[in-house]
Amino acid sequence: MEPLPAAVTAILLDIEGTTTPITFVKDILFPYIQDNVEEYLQKHWHEEECQDDVRQLKLQAEKDSGQKGFVPIPSNTEAELQVIKGVAANVLWQMSLDRKTTALKQLQGHMWRSAYASGKVKGEVYDDVVPALKKWKGAGMKLYIFSSGSVEAQKLLFGYSIEGDLLELFHGHFDTTVGSKVESDSYRRIADKIGCSTENILFLTDIIKEAEAAREAGVHVAIAVRPGNAALTDEEKSEYHLITSFDQLPLQSTH
Ligand SMILES: CSCCC(=O)C(=O)COP(=O)(O)O
Ligand SMILES: [Mg+2]
């Protein structure tokens, strides 16, 4: 890759497939939710946070009701255990489609809290990630995360990572409350919130639809090619800067 354009002052990072192996999300984080969601809901059902998560899931279910295979959430007139089982079934249905709804991600973030805090789970990052983040930050870059995982889930992953607490490396975190990762406006909103132009941002992701949305907004993009990531077509390979490791992202001397 050519040196980063001098205009770039902020690096925005995707997590799954970019900083972190997809297998960590698919084989560790998601099964934890699938195995524990019903028990979690039973344990926390009467807490305000859990009730808010359920409210958000019900609002999402209203939007999803026309979808093929949709799993409805029973109304509160049903027995409590029936509602809990229905919420759990809806969560499992959303996860079977790898939905990125804010409601699902909010509940997941709350559920992972105890998995990380107890030491059962540690956030994985590729070996090249921490040295590169430290170098970029040392060179004056501002580092941000943009993931479909909730901000709380992001902070857990990096706060309880295999390399220790990495949170001080980041200036900020964005999730789908700013908009979907496949919509250009989300990247414009992020630039506004950071207080810079979209041209000042470099976005690293593994997903072409996210790359297209970011590029349409004027954000610079590089694609992370990691083991297990979705294959790219020859056309996609030729259209984007590809990196297999963060140390392939050279800074100009001005940075
Ligand atoms: C950071 S939480 C775990 C990842 C997750 O739930 C997810 O949906 C990954 O989304 P990303 O946008 O980081 O690919
Ligand atoms: Mg990703």
Image (cartoon, grey):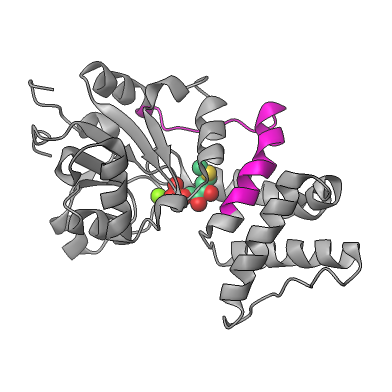
Question: In this rendering, is residue 14 above or below 169?
Answer: below
Q: Quadrant of the C terminus?
A: top left
Q: Quick check: 239 left or right of 160?
A: left
Which range of residues does the magenta coloring cover? 105-129
Residue 187 relative to residue 9: left or right: right
Q: Position of residue 173 (x, y in %)?
A: 42, 37
**Where residue 224 sits in the image (x, y, percent)?**
30, 45
User: Compared to 255, does 224 lie above or below?
Assistant: below
| Above or below 122: residue 149 | below
User: Can residue 161 be seen in the rendering of this structure?
Assistant: no
Q: Is residue 119 magenta?
A: yes
Query: Magenta segment: does it hold 18?
Result: no
Total number of numbered discs in the rendering: 0
Image quadrant in which the N terminus is located: top left
Q: Quadrant of residue 142?
A: top left
Q: Where residue 214 appears, x then y in whole percent?
A: 25, 54
**Image-quadrant location for residue 133:** top left
> Is residue 249 left or right of 194 when viewed as pictured?
left
Of residues 54 and 24, which is closer to you in this image? 54
Determine if residue 220 is in view: yes
- The residue drawn where x is 82% and y is 61% is 84
Instruction: Reply above or below: 80 against 193.
Output: below
Determine the residue positioned at 26% across, 35% down. Answer: 11
Residue lying farthest to the top in this orientation = 138
Instruction: Please state the horizontal and vertical placement of residue 140, each as a whole percent of the image.
Output: 22, 20
Residue name at image x 37 percent, y 42 percent: 18
